[in-house]
Image (spheres, rainbow, N blue to C red):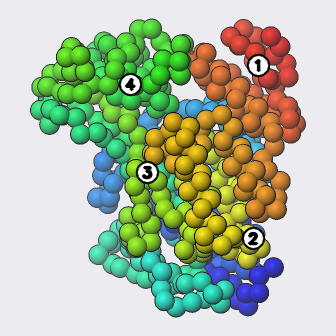
Amino acid sequence: MSGTTRRQRVAVIGAGPAGLCCLKHLAAKPELFEPVAFERNFWPGGIWNYTDQTRKDAFGLPVHSALYNKLKINVPKELQEFPSFPYPKEWKTSYITRQHCWEYLNMFTDHFDIRKYIRFHSFVRNVKPLKEINENGKPKWLVTFSPVTRMSEVNTEVFDAVLVCNGHDFNDYTPNIPGLELFEGRAIHSKEFRYEEHFDGLRVAILGCHYSGEDISMHVAKFAKKVYACHRRNPKEFPPSFPKDIEQRPPFVRMTRYSVVFPDGSSEKVDAVIFCTGYRFSYPFLKDDVITIKDERIEPIYKHMVHIEYNNLVFVGIPRQWSYFPHYHEMAKLAALILAGEVKLPSKENMLADSEADFQSRLKEGKPPSFAHYMGDIDRQFRYNEDLAKMGGFDPLPPVLEMMWDDVMDERYMNLPNCNTFDYEITGPQSYRCLNPEGIKTRFCKAENVKR
């Protein structure tokens, strides 16, 4: 145990899934921690706080949520469940709606009695280290914030540590396509997409076709006159089950008043464009002397979470493309152990070397620099979880999660339009079953009651 003689005040930036997990683990050690979470919404849940509003909210701030009205989670809820806190038994459907996911997060909040630690409608302006040292020999942190209802009011408080949990799916990226400013149709980022019915009878070009692009393409195609899915994905990696009525084209490189133009000079007349081009990391409350972001690589960060210079600044939720609820829970568990002094971190030099080795290994695999924190390939996310568990001295996530992940990713690849119609149940640390296996799989399945 730490030699701390008083409780540490810990600021948690954001009360989405990652922030809620941090509050749970900090609150479990009341003798060590006094947590305070800053949440700009009126409810916990982060991006799962759906709103019909786009661009600006009622207070003139950028809308945080990127959800659309008919969104369902893109993996079974069994892969998006906090350890030790199952979904209600009566929720048999695996691919739950956004409403159910938000409800689950609020159930989690109330079950662990952590709502009392959240300051709602609070906008964090700045987080900076002070020269003042706390009892653990670490710098204290000055947090500057304002109520969203009174942005002219500026408040400050001092904390012993900071956990950054503001997510990474809110700072939308739209490429600078020549001619975009001339286009007279509707052009939006997927963050602004809410209702598929709004594209009834239109010709729509969608740029980018990963999870969101695939899903939005299929939603829009129910109403649109024509949909072009414009992407550069390797044909071997693109789902062969993608609907044939959605025409695949390369990314368009130019736009005119009424059309999109492709690399070979051909064009298609369109009425609307949806940019499913993803998001960029953003920590506007941290200055460049604390972190730098270049080509989506955040530095200096150890194990994608611990600031190498300031070890009491910890990020929970940086990695992308993984089964994130259970992983966030385990990252938060480790973060609490680090702040409690129960985990001995390597030297600064060794942490820097480890971070660079991880980055270089990705480049050698042929990944671009922007994949510095990507976890969605092969078994990377689960080996990462094992690393964190070893650091913290706790058990890693059960093997069944990796088994299910591999299975549902295969199903998504081979059966994209119908993959979210199947329901699953975890039956043990290394077993699960499909509740509606009849006619299911186009391939071998690892579920215990589906044999091929």
Look at the image and tell me in which quarter the N terminus lies.
bottom right
Residue on which the image places disc 4: 231
Camera-side residue of 8 and 68: 8
- Tag shown at residue 445: 1
Q: CA distance from mark 1 to mark 2?
A: 39 Å
Q: Verify CB contact (< 8 Å) between mark 1 and mark 4.
A: no
Q: CA distance from mark 1 to mark 4?
A: 29 Å
Q: Amino acid at mark 4?
A: His
Camera-side residue of 26 and 276: 276
Q: CA distance from mark 1 to mark 3?
A: 35 Å
Q: Verify CB contact (< 8 Å) between mark 4 and mark 3.
A: no
Residue on which the image places disc 2: 343
Q: Relative to 424, does residue 63 appear above or below in the rendering?
A: below
How many residues crowd mark 3 within 10 Å: few (<14), some (14–19), many (20+)? some
How many residues crowd mark 4 within 10 Å: few (<14), some (14–19), many (20+)? many
Q: Relative to 236, does residue 306 appear above or below in the rendering?
A: below
Q: Amino acid at mark 1?
A: Cys
Q: CA distance from mark 3 to mark 2?
A: 28 Å
Q: Is residue 369 visible?
A: yes
Q: Amino acid at mark 2?
A: Val
> Disc 2 on helix, strand or loop?
loop
How many residues crowd mark 1 within 10 Å: few (<14), some (14–19), many (20+)? many
Q: Residue at x 21, y 14 (%)?
A: 266
Look at the image and tell me in which quarter the C terminus lies.
top right
